[in-house]
Amino acid sequence: MMTLTAMTLSPSPKTQSPLRALDTQQMLQSRLLIEQLYEDLLARYGPILGGADLAQAMGYRSLAAFRQARRRGQVEVALFTLPNRRGVFALGLDVARWLADAYQTNFVSSHALRQPL
């Protein structure tokens, strides 16, 4: 009978686990995607989005659809109000993070859509 000790289970400090390397690569890709999305949002709308711009950036068909989602508690971005301004606003960086997360979570490969022959 063979017993496993902590020494046999722990990876050597000199070698990096393939899973850890994969996680690091995914984190880098995620960060690059967030940066690119934020740069685009910043160029289009500025650092703060509100109203129809916010609804469009989050993929809602209309401002009314965004309002309905907000009433239902389905908007997953931190919203805030500004003094002496109507409506709600979100930071462009928060929207970029949400978009990147939604993309990575819900990514559908073109191969997955094909039916087997």
Image: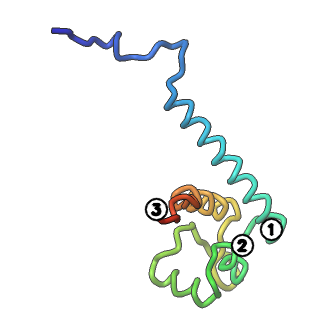
Along the viewing direction, whichever of 30 and 46 lies nearer the viewer: 30
Q: Which comes before the other along the chain, label 2 or label 3?
A: 2
Disc assigned to residue 116: 3
Residue type, mark 2 in image: Leu
At 61% from the left and 72% from the top, the residue drawn is 80
Within the image, what quadrant is residue 42 found in?
bottom right
Left or right: residue 48 compared with residue 69: right
Q: Helix, strand, or loop for circle 2? A: strand
Distance Cα–Cα, label 2 vs label 1: 7 Å
Q: Residues within 10 Å of mark 3 (few under 14, many from 20)?
A: few
Please report contact status of discs 1 and 3: CB closer than 8 Å, yes or no.
Answer: no
Disc assigned to residue 8: none
At 66% from the left and 45% from the top, the residue drawn is 29
Q: Residues within 10 Å of mark 1 (few under 14, many from 20)?
A: few
State the quadrant of the N terminus. Answer: top left
| Position of residue 91 measured from the top left corner of the image (x, y, whole percent) | 68, 65
Residue situated furthest front in the rendering: 117
Within the image, what quadrant is residue 97 found in?
bottom right
Q: Which residue is mark 1?
A: 46
Along the viewing direction, whichever of 89 and 99 lies nearer the viewer: 99
Residue situated furthest bottom in the rendering: 64
> Is residue 12 shown above or below 24?
above
| Position of residue 82 measured from the top left corner of the image (x, y, whole percent) | 68, 75
Q: Which residue is mark 2?
A: 49
Please report contact status of discs 2 and 1: CB closer than 8 Å, yes or no.
Answer: yes
Which is more foreground, mark 1 or mark 3?
A: 3
Residue type, mark 3 in image: Pro
Please report contact status of discs 2 and 3: CB closer than 8 Å, yes or no.
Answer: no
| Position of residue 58 measured from the top left corner of the image (x, y, whole percent) | 63, 73
> Is residue 34 shown above or below 77?
above
